[in-house]
Image (tube, grey):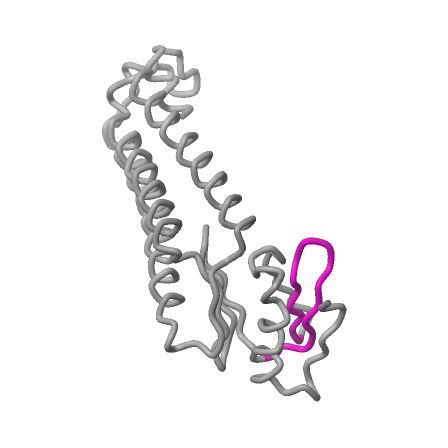
Amino acid sequence: MAVTVFVGFDLPVEFLRVSGRNLPYRFETFMIFGLILLLINIRRTIRRWMGMYIVNRKDKFRWNTEVSKERRQRVVAYNLLEGFVMGSVALGLYMVTPQAWFPAVALLFCTVDNLVFTIIGITGHRFRAGVTSKAVILADRDVQLLYFIGLRKVSIHQQSIYFDYIKGLQLNIPVDSIPEEKRSEFFAAIEGVVDKDKVFFSNLR
């Protein structure tokens, strides 16, 4: 964005002793920044599409359910807000200077992917949480994978379900990811696959 502003408004770049429109390697700079944006978002996109695919293979899970209505509403709101921001930034970059077309295209790609992901997730009831013999997986806005190896405690505090591991590691998922009427089943599924002598369950009701 800074490079776009300098180039688009032809501002002086004092330490290079040139103005924005005469900045050397402008094309290469925009291409590099656009490529970085694209790679970061492609990595995230692949991860969450794969997470959605895996968690919807219900036959592979000991327990599996769609996330709660409240969580779905929050996911839609966050994704739409994120898409609006990325789309606005893409439009803004291009309007300031058409030379920033590649970063703008990268952000626009992310905006479209975000919208498609949200529509498929909601209409196909694909935002889900599941328990396997090895881990808990939550796939909605992003993917969270919580393995049982090294797990020592499962507890609820405020709006999160916490998973405490050896060496002080702590992971969590939003408590409203699991429908309230199915939380007992969720914790029972975890209790059924972990060593109860090593894992302490606290404040789960």
Q: Picture quarter containing residue 14?
A: top left
Residue 162 among those drawn in magenta: yes
- Observer-nearest residue: 32 or 110? 110
- x and y percent of residue 93 in the render? 34, 23
- x and y percent of residue 2 in the render? 42, 24
Q: Picture quarter containing residue 174?
A: bottom right
Residue drawn at 43 percent across, 30 percent down: 85
Residue 185 among those drawn in magenta: no
Against 32, is 70 above or below?
A: below
Residue drawn at 34 percent across, 11 percent down: 10
- Observer-nearest residue: 66 or 155? 66
Against 192, is 135 above or below?
A: above
Numbered marks: total: 0
Residue drawn at 34 percent across, 27 percent down: 90
Against 91, is 60 above or below?
A: below
| Residue 129 placement, left or right of 38 | right
Rendered-image quadrant of the C terminus: bottom right
For this orientation, the residue located farthest to the front is 181
Residue drawn at 29 percent across, 17 percent down: 97
Q: Picture quarter containing residue 101?
A: top left
- Observer-nearest residue: 110 or 103? 110
- x and y percent of residue 19 in the render? 34, 13
Which SS does the magenta portion mostly show? Answer: strand
Against 93, is 48 above or below?
A: below
- x and y percent of residue 42 in the render? 32, 49
Q: Which residues are magenta?
A: 150-166
| Residue 148 placement, left or right of 4 | right
